[in-house]
Image (tube, helix red, strand yellow):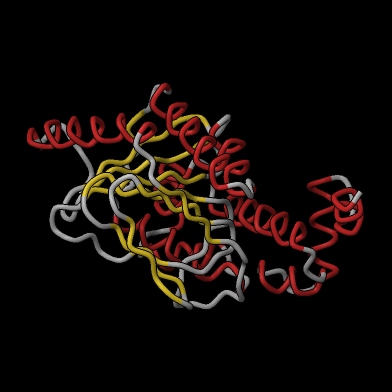
Amino acid sequence: MVATAHDPGMDVRLFRWWRELDRLPGQISNVHVWRGAGHPTGEWDYHVTPTLVASLVGVVRAERPDGRLDLGPGEVLLIDAGVMHRHAPLRAGSVHFGLGMMATWSDVLLGDQRHRWCGRLPSQPSRRMLDAAVAEPDALGRRALVAALLRQVLAESIEDLDLSRPELDRMLHVLWRRLHEGVTSADLVRASGLSRSQAWMVFQHGYGVTPCQAILHCRLWLAERLLAEGLPIAEIAQRCGWPSADGFARTWKRERGAAPSAVRRRRRT
């Protein structure tokens, strides 16, 4: 459920959640990091940019193929791009905070077992700060970067973001689980159960760009992360849903202005 003017009780809950979030930068006890993009499957979510999840009250559980992590109050988990994971249903009394990245903005989520509120803010500087926190090897340095990121989010003017429509949820589910299968905009429309024009309108309102643009952005963002890991070009193409390594290389050069191999050489230098 997303906060609306028709739910007067939501204002009270939202105020409490924001008050807990306001305390979090000074009360961070530990920042965990999940790195290492695995081979995608249809059973796990994977995002193409880093995401953040924190426990504000109670226990928040995140799972991945090789284990799970229970976050207590003040604990934060950073999930790098391409990491297979999923979030377990919240327990009664628990409250979580999430920060992710969409095509043209960052999205924030506050919620408990039964209710949630979504908002959006400019993607920068949150995206750069989140990338820096994920890459930071020192635990104390990482905690300081996360605290600075949270203070930045709290200082932003955050608008309501309506992600409540089940049609949008189904389209995002397909996008985040089937990108490696070469998912198309037609697949998203089919998942929505709407007509093409209705599906594109719902998707663009919630995600910020059209389904075609979203698929391209997601593939490029994930490929950028996999290039940084040094994976072979053919494997990157497969994991990101391109039909061939040549197709990936052509798209990358058209969108980024240089061949993937050139980007890798620059990173090594």
211 sits to left or right of 256: left
Percent from the top left, x then y, of residue 59? 25, 57
Along the viewing direction, whichever of 164 and 187 lies nearer the viewer: 164
Residue visible at 72% across and 54% down?
224
Q: Is residue 136 above or below residue 212?
A: above
Percent from the top left, x then y, of residue 116? 24, 46
Q: Is residue 233 above or below residue 98?
A: below
**Quadrant of residue 70 within the rendered picture:** bottom left
Percent from the top left, x then y, of residue 80? 57, 56
Q: Is residue 124 above or below residue 85?
A: above
Along the viewing direction, whichever of 178 and 86 lies nearer the viewer: 86
Residue visible at 55% across and 47% down?
139
Residue visible at 51% across and 44% down?
101
Q: Is residue 29 above or below residue 152?
A: below
3 sits to left or right of 220: left
Q: How many marks?
A: 0
Percent from the top left, x then y, of residue 211? 54, 53
Residue visible at 58% across and 48% down?
134
Along the viewing direction, whichever of 11 and 23 lies nearer the viewer: 23
* Farthest residue, direction left: 9
